[in-house]
Amino acid sequence: MKYVIKKEDAEKCLNFAEASRGSTWDYSSNAEKNKDSNRIIEIYIGKLGEMGFKYFLESVGIVPNCPEMFKIYEQKEKRDYTDFVMPNGKKIDVKSTRGWGIGGNPKHLNDQHYYVGVKVEINEDDLLDCPIVEIKGYNTPDGPWTIKTSKYGDDYMYLHFSFMYDINDLLNKWEIR
């Protein structure tokens, strides 16, 4: 399922990315990574993916619980590791990319019930020009994750979109409504 992010929502996502870069919300303590000019784009893509998943939930009649979607945490122990909490208490982390799979911090793999993969398309010449998000599917912490090392030396988990389950199964089979 694809969604075009409304301009006002894209602006909120971009403002969040610009304001949070280098804060403790920005999970990397790696100074080199925080100086990377592409880091704002990475944070923006992540927030667009969350917004797209919010659109998806609303389209199927679920009112998502994400009251702190744009909160920037200044203290590491108050970081949000969960993007959405479903009415039945299940925790979901949305992972977004422009590539062919999702990644994340393996230290927090078991903190969620589900991981939702979202592919994001943006125009880097005009970041607010009709960003498109596509919900690719979901998986669990038990999915076939691969642990890799980033160019910054951090370990991260990776899962190709082809290993994801249909997002509708998450609604039906696992009853997150």
Image: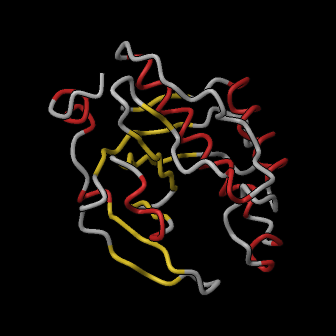
Q: Is residue 122 left or right of residue 141?
A: right
Furthest residue in direction front, as rendered: 77
- Quarter-of-image position of residue 147: bottom left
Q: Is residue 162 left or right of residue 5?
A: left
- Foreground: 72 or 77? 77
Say if 28 sits above or below 135 in the image: below
| Residue at image coords 71%, 38% | 13
Residue 104 coordinates in the image, percent (x, y): 49, 64
Residue 113 visible? The answer is: yes
Quadrant location of the C terminus in the rendered image: top left
In the depicted structure, whether residue 29 falls above or below residue 86: below
Residue 126, visible in the rendered structure: no
Q: Which image quadrant: the N terminus? A: top left
- Residue 141: percent from the left, percent from the top? 31, 59
Residue at the location (41% across, 23% down)?
A: 57
Vertical position of residue 71 compared to residue 161: above or below = above
